[in-house]
Image (cartoon, rainbow, N blue to C red):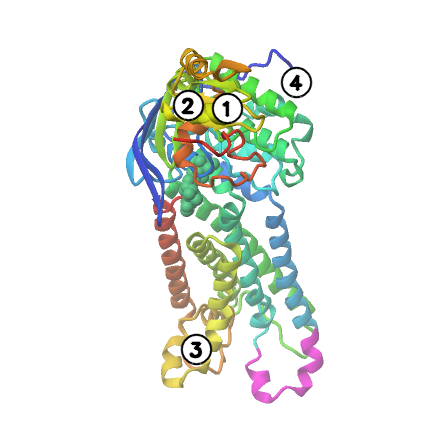
Amino acid sequence: MIHVQGITKRYKDTLAVDDLSFEVREGVVTGFLGPNGSGKSTTMRMIMGLDAPDEGTATIDGTSYHGLGLPLREVGALLEAKAIHPGRSAFNHLWYLAQTNDIARQRVDDVLEMVGLSAVAHRRVGKFSLGMGQRLGIAAALLGDPPTLLFDEPINGLDPEGILWVRNLLKGLAAEGRTVFVSSHLMSEMALTAEQLVVIGRGRLISSGSVDDFIAESSGQFVRVRSPEARALEALLLERGAHVVAEDDGSYSVSGLDAAAIGTLAGDAGLHLHELSPQMASLEEAFMELTRDSVEYRGHESPHGAPVTASFPSTNSGK
Amino acid sequence: MSTTLTYTSRDLAPATHARVRTSSALRGEWTKLRSVRSTTWTILALAVITLGVAAIAGSTVSSSWHTMSAFERQTFDPTGLSLRGMLFGQLVIGVLGILVMSAEYSTGSIRSTLMAVPSRSKVMLTKVAIMAVVGFVVSEVLSFGAFFLGQALLASPAPHATLSQPGVLRAVMGGGLVLTVLGLVALGLATIIRHSAAAITTYVGVLLVLPLVVQALPTSISQPITKYLPFHISDAMTSVTHVLGSGPSLSPWTGFAVLCGYAGVALAVGTWMLVRRDA
Ligand SMILES: Nc1ncnc2c1ncn2[C@@H]1O[C@H](COP(=O)(O)OP(=O)(O)O)[C@@H](O)[C@H]1O
Ligand SMILES: [Mg+2]
């Protein structure tokens, strides 16, 4: 169980994390979701005792990181920035960590086997691909067989096979009863992996709860409408206070009125409808909706090639 | 990869103590030091420089003996000559001391280190201990090696030194000690500065540039300062007949105590900053 209580972190003039509180339970994968720069990595570093919060506390099973006895046996973490010396072999990287926490040498071989790096254990890490480096980081997190695990953007740089592997790994660890906390800036990834969500934007908590609740509580439903008399219909809908978004394919996404109301409105005005279908917002859209005001780098490509605003409903929305 | 993979350990003994043990942290730190190539390379470079200079200086002095003045012959210091390479060695051991800490920051491995050993004063303590022991063993071996090699190659008519002559054992032992302590000064600087290049520049500046700057000052100012410079402390320690024409020196052991003081300050400030700063 991870417990974060009112943590705040300021770097010079950046407020990276702002009075953030949440809990991460054992036995499920909890996703930590937020656009790039929203403070996920900073929060994880504070949980791991690397950065000191200006205010608030972060505890793991009731203890701050500095109070943990042999920390690698209590919590393991894969951080976003590589924390591995490229000149060292994979084995030696894990071996020195194991030595500090009185972990048997056999366990080093075991975790190397688990992540599929046994064959390259004695090769220098600098020669590893991004995916292999990521696997080594995961091996280090698993080294002490800890009940709590943190993964910061674990699928970055992985190929589809690797992504699938990580997904199954996270679920498997949670199924063993562990606390698994995994960050991502991609809602689509969280939808496939996580059961619980902590959503942040600009360092503040936006929402926390189950993935299902998250969809329901965010803007949620809308109605797709298609009409040959689109302009007239749009004007009518806006007049009635609906929120209308023109989509690229010529349809309109309407929220604020349900399908029945839209149908009646169109019928009364004598407008034809070619489509009138209630839709569930995708998780991605729900995420965008919630973080709309807190995206720091709106419209920029994220460093990993996935556009932050990928499925952001296109322009032209009326009020 | 197997589909029935589980992540639980079969043979992880339960933790029996409430803290990371110092002995365990030391073992980990030793593994870290010996598992990177830069350690091997710097120690090799240190050996080549100290032994190489001793060999060259020892084997060439006899041919220039007849051109030396009577005063030069009288004050000729065969011990100091063999240890001349130690002055260059100071730069190399500094690089080793710096890399022990700065490589952790340049590669990000400091985060792995601190996650495994959250007590930062313990991290610092283990690094200092490992650097002190490794530095001491390597420096003493090379100091004695340089002395014996240099003496063996010294041909008559130049006189030889033996360890039983007054001051010689002190100079040879002391040369290794000075090197050891300078490695710790470098480690302290690197903990404060955290960037390899900046730390090396600062270290070289203190060792080599500072003496030049001081020398350029009016004598009334430079004379009382000069003897406290690491360069001069080291020179006083490794010389038997001292004739550095730049005024008074501290006695070898007083100078050494001052040098230890520098290391203490650098390490204390470094530890304080390591504890205080985000990683
Ligand atoms: N060490 C640091 N120094 C200065 N600013 C930082 C530092 N770490 C993070 N920040 C800033 O804090 C904010 C949050 O960053 P981060 O926690 O990395 O977000 P995320 O992981 O969600 O992308 C960003 O504006 C970032 O630039
Ligand atoms: Mg991040």
User: Both on one chain, marks 2 and 3?
Assistant: no
Residue A304 at x, y percent in the picture: 57, 37
The amino acid type of the residue labelled 1 equals Tyr
Q: Give the alpha-carbon distance from disc 4 to disc 3, as whole Å.
A: 66 Å
Q: Chain of mark 1?
A: A
Which residue matches tag 1? A252
Above or below A244: residue B130: below
Which residue matches tag 2? A237
The amino acid type of the residue labelled 2 equals Leu
Q: Label 2's element?
A: helix
Which residue matches tag 3? B214
Above or below B96: residue A157: above
Q: Residues within 10 Å of mark 1 (few under 14, many from 20)?
A: many
Q: Is residue B185 visible?
A: yes
Q: Nearer the viewer, mark 2 or mark 3?
A: 2
Q: Give the alpha-carbon distance from disc 1 to disc 3, as whole Å.
A: 79 Å
Q: Are marks 1 and 2 in contact (CB under 8 Å)?
A: yes
Give the magenta part as a residue range: B60-76
Image quarter for ligand 1 equals top left
Q: Nearer the viewer, mark 1 or mark 2?
A: 2
Q: Main secondary structure of the magenta part?
A: helix
Judging depth in this view, the residue of A155 and A111 nearest the camera is A155
Q: Earlier in the sequence, mark 1 or mark 2?
A: 2
Residue B213 at x, y percent in the picture: 46, 77
Q: Which mark is residue B1?
A: 4
Please give left or right for residue A64 compared with residue A250 in the image: left
Q: Label 4's element?
A: loop
**Identity of the residue drawn at 49% across and 46% down:** B130
